[in-house]
Amino acid sequence: MALEEAREVVRDLVSQRDGALAEVQALHTLLNGERATVAHRIALAEEVAAASASIQAHETEAEALQIALDELQVTAEELEASNAALASANTGLKATLAERKRVENALRDSESRWRGVFEHMHEGFALCEVDGPAGDEGSDFRYLEVNGAWERLTGVPASATVGRTAREIFPGIEDFWGHTYRRVVETGEPAHIEHHLGNRWYEVLAYRTGAGRFAALFMNVTDRRASDARQDALVELGDQLRDLRDASEIAPAAADLIGRTLGVSRAGYGTLDASEETIRIDRDWTDGSLPSLAGVHHPMSAYWPGYLDELRSGEAVIIEDVTLDPRSAERAAAHSAIGVQAQILIPVVHAGRITALLYVHSASPRRWSTGETAFARASMERAWAAAERARAEERRALLVNELNHRVKNTLAVVQSIAAQTARNAVDVPAFSSAFQSRLIALALAHDLLTREDWTGAPLNAVVRAALTPLALDDGRVDLSGCSGHIVLPPAEALALTLAMHELATNAVKHGALSSVNGRVSVTCRTTHHSDGNPVVEWVERGGPQIDVSPSRKGFGLRLLQRSLQGKEGLAADLRFEREGLRCTLRLAPRPVPHSKSKN
């Protein structure tokens, strides 16, 4: 704007100069005219001089204005250059601002993305600073920031963590933590550790982030540590079971290991009676907070009426709080009386019946993990299998010893039978017949006992086995008075077999069965004799009349009167009545399990 105004002024001055020049030109014309007077010429000359002076002044001013105009032109050009530079700079600034905004947006997006990762990462993260100057022997540190996983992994809210020291949050925390982190800060060397804080275990990677500060990335590895401990315990149990040979020691060893590994109050095994009414506990393990239940007979209905069927199915019963679980709430008072607030019960089921039970007790409510239940079952199954192997070994050793003893006895009996038979035989055919008959009776008795696992044999089955080799007519031998509820021990069953066989052999040769009309009745009394022994009575009728007792005693009489009575406690009372022989055999059976025989 100023440049245009200056140019207008110059144009006016040029115009005025041009006007003055015209006037001077006119004056010169007048001055040179013939009619002009001197005076008039002088006046005109003065006017010309004045006009020339004015022209000179205007030219001087015009020159000055031209100089100013030139300078202003330069200034305008510089201004235009400056404006162009400013416009270029403004464009660059706008581009810079746009780039800055883009970078800021990208930074915000990145920060938001990483903040999301930070907050949602599975691992815990804490930014901390050591509490105290460098070289301080103290072991505390302060939390500056924690992520969302912190609360899940430690159980402490973030709002109660930031700005506070570890000792404020975790009273009694070990110096180990503070010393480890201070060493990281002072040396710059990262630390990878696995250590416990209270009852939780953590794996931590700590590294220095700045002066006095460090970051800790951590995971709760309590479950992994517990799983490793359970696996180690199973290996240890296997090692123990390999060295144990006594079945009665296996269950307590397993209970001890289960209790210590799971950190419970009590663990043990119990065996149930045939009716599943009572459980007997011989030994168990406790941590000292609860008394032992060993030596006590516990009625099942007092504790488990709500889940006996569940136990019979072979499934583990898991109760986290006996007062809240509907299966145990009805008997919560009974459980509390023995200190149980939570429990795991794992049954051993055979043929649909509970034969044994593993119990794991906690004195306070407890949430049982799947791994803990699986460990308890695996331990129980290994212990039970080991106990079964031990019992099988015991039975095998017992059977081997029994077999050796039995073979020796059998050979002695056979040898005796052979010798006595040979002594009374008139020739080889007579010896062979009598000897074979006696061996068959003895073999049948052995077969009978083998079917009963050599635990004993029913009395009536023993009588029938003794008479079988002689192929007697059932119509002539009445055994209806002999019931099968009396069970004889093996030794006594063999003795009675030989006795009955000799009585039958004698009856066939000399007694009632040697006559067509002769009969024999065998009675096994269900009531005891006056001396308390069961009685088997052999009575012959319808045979040859007996006037006097036989003077010659053969193998059968000697066996009945001396051999069996002296060795097996089988007392024989022989009475040779006129109508026939009456033999009363008094037995002394030992307590044995009831027979499985259907006879």
Image (cartoon, grey):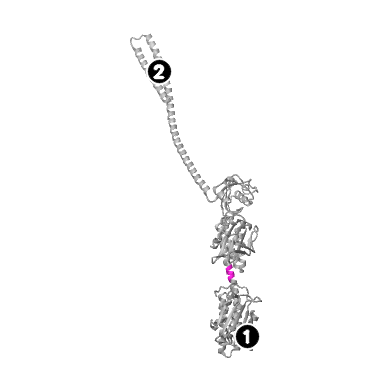
Is there CB contact under 8 Å for labels 2 and 1? no
Count residues near mark 2 (Cα–Cα under 10 Å), then give few for <14, some for 14-19, many for 20+. many
Residue 524 rendering spot, x and y as whole percentages: 60, 77
Question: For the point 47% across and 38% down, which residue is it?
Answer: 97
Q: Which mark is residue 251?
A: none
Three-letter code for the amino acid on which mark 1 is drawn: Phe
Three-letter code for the amino acid on which mark 2 is drawn: Ile
Q: Is residue 92 magenta?
A: no
Residue 486 position by quadrant: bottom right
* Image quarter hosting the C terminus: bottom right
Count residues near mark 1 (Cα–Cα under 10 Å), then give few for <14, some for 14-19, many for 20+. some
Q: Is residue 390 magenta?
A: yes
The answer to whether residue 594 shows anywhere in this view is yes
Q: Foreground residue, 549 or 180? A: 549
Q: Is residue 79 above or below residue 293?
A: above
Q: Which mark is residue 576?
A: 1
Q: Which residue is mark 2?
A: 55
Left or right of 49? Residue 332 is: right
Residue 373 rendering spot, x and y as whole percentages: 56, 59
Left or right of 1? Residue 132 is: right
* Image quarter hosting the N terminus: top left
Q: Which residues are magenta?
A: 387-392
Q: Foreground residue, 447 or 196? A: 447
CA distance separating discs 2 and 1: 197 Å
Left or right of 315? Residue 287 is: right
Question: For the point 40% across and 16% down, which residue is it?
Answer: 52
Residue 236 rendering spot, x and y as whole percentages: 59, 63
